[in-house]
Amino acid sequence: MTIHPSQIILIIGLLFFIFYLFKLRKLIFDRIFFLIVAIVGLILVLFPQLSAIVANWLGIVRGSDLVFYTFIIFSLFYFVSLNAEIRMLRKQITELARSQALANPVKGKKPKKNLVTKL
Amino acid sequence: MFFMVTMIGKTKSIVKKPRVCVIITAYHEEAAISKVLESLCRFSHNVIVIDDGSRDATAKKALEFPVTLLRHPINLGAGAAMQTGFEFATQLPIDYVVTLDADGQHEPSEIPRLVDICQKGHFDIVLGSRFLPGATAENIGWFRKAVLKLGTIFTQVATGLKVTDTHNSFRVFTRASAAKIHMKQNRYAHSSELLAQIAVSKLKYTEAPVIVRYTEYSKKKGQSTWNMINILWDMISEKIK
């Protein structure tokens, strides 16, 4: 089995993705990452032939394939970022709902005498 | 004579009656909660019902009994409800906190025995098990049993705890140990998270055989066997920052 340079880059990208998930993920890194992706996207729009040149360097046949692979990795990062935001919101909602429940305990009917068996 | 009286006084204080508080979490349990509370209120003065955002008559039915009702404004999940119960109960002047299910699969008459085990063995936590010798798991399907066993092996490996039943919510905690539990998992993975916290906090635990009765109702209401996948997913996603 021969490994292509593009495969190595994809594997490194995905391994970095796993490392990022568990160790590095912070809002500031997310923003820097999205900014870089946006700038790269802008450059590719202005100079479409660049994608083909870079793809050839990496041994990928077409420039559009390179853009597609990059899009998949970018989507994974974005998915995780959104997921983290949702979990943070859910945590805040939980705390809010819990504090409301704890602040308003309601007593049920009074116990009948001799109902409780002594432990 | 004075010495004897002092000794009797001391003996009495040693065998002090434990003050027990029972937490029961309920979501859409209007069909079963009355029966469970009727039985439960015979064994504890101090029953706390956490209504986890039910839109049916669960809260109304619970208030027909001498209980304290706490209501989540929205449905958060069994783990979140149990944590709310712990936070409320640990502020009360009690010795032990007992948790059990609202769908009637546990037997409240077993509470005194479990509390006794906790008290006499000076344990922090007693975990109910349906798989120990002497336990009963009525009407448990083979598939559910197999998945529960698999989940137990997984939790044993992940936490290092030697337990035989990880997803049994019939448990007894001392007040101090309940105060150490801070569950963040709202839904499926809270049982595994709780055991992980027992392991990390190095709480002294034991297992005790309990009766678990699966009825058609509890099977319908309880977690689906396929929820093991949800549990795994929740456990992994909790590790993500």
Image (cartoon, helix red, strand yellow):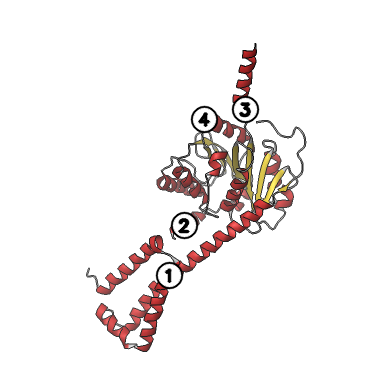
Q: Residue at x 38, y 87 (%)?
A: A45
On screen, residue B183 versus residue B7, left or right, reads left
| Mark number, residue A30 | 1
Is the Cβ of the residue at disc 2 closer than 8 Å to that at disc 4? no
Q: In the rendered view, does B60 fall on the left or right side of A24?
A: right
- The residues tagged by marks 2 and 4 sit, at their Cα atoms, a distance apart of 34 Å
How far apart marks 4 and 1 lie (CA) works out to: 51 Å
Dot 3, crowdedness within 10 Å: few (<14), some or many (≥20)? few
Residue with the mark numbered 3:
B16
Disc 4 to disc 3, C-alpha distance: 15 Å
Marked residue nearer the N-terminal end (4 or 3)? 3
Q: Are marks 4 and 1 on the same chain?
A: no
Which image quarter: residue B14? top right
> Helix, strand, or loop for circle 1?
helix
How many C-alpha atoms fall within 10 Å of the one at disc 4: few (<14), some, or many (≥20)?
few
- Amino acid type of the residue that numbered disc 2 sits on in the rendered structure: Glu
B38 and B4: which is toward the camera:
B4
Q: Chain of mark 2?
A: B
Q: Is residue A22 left or right of residue B188?
A: left
Left or right side of A119 for B128: left
Secondary-structure class at tag 3: loop
The tag on residue B121 is 4
* Residue name at image x 41 percent, y 76 percent: A35
Asked whether residue B42 appears in the rendered view, the answer is yes
CA separation in Å, label 2 and label 1: 18 Å
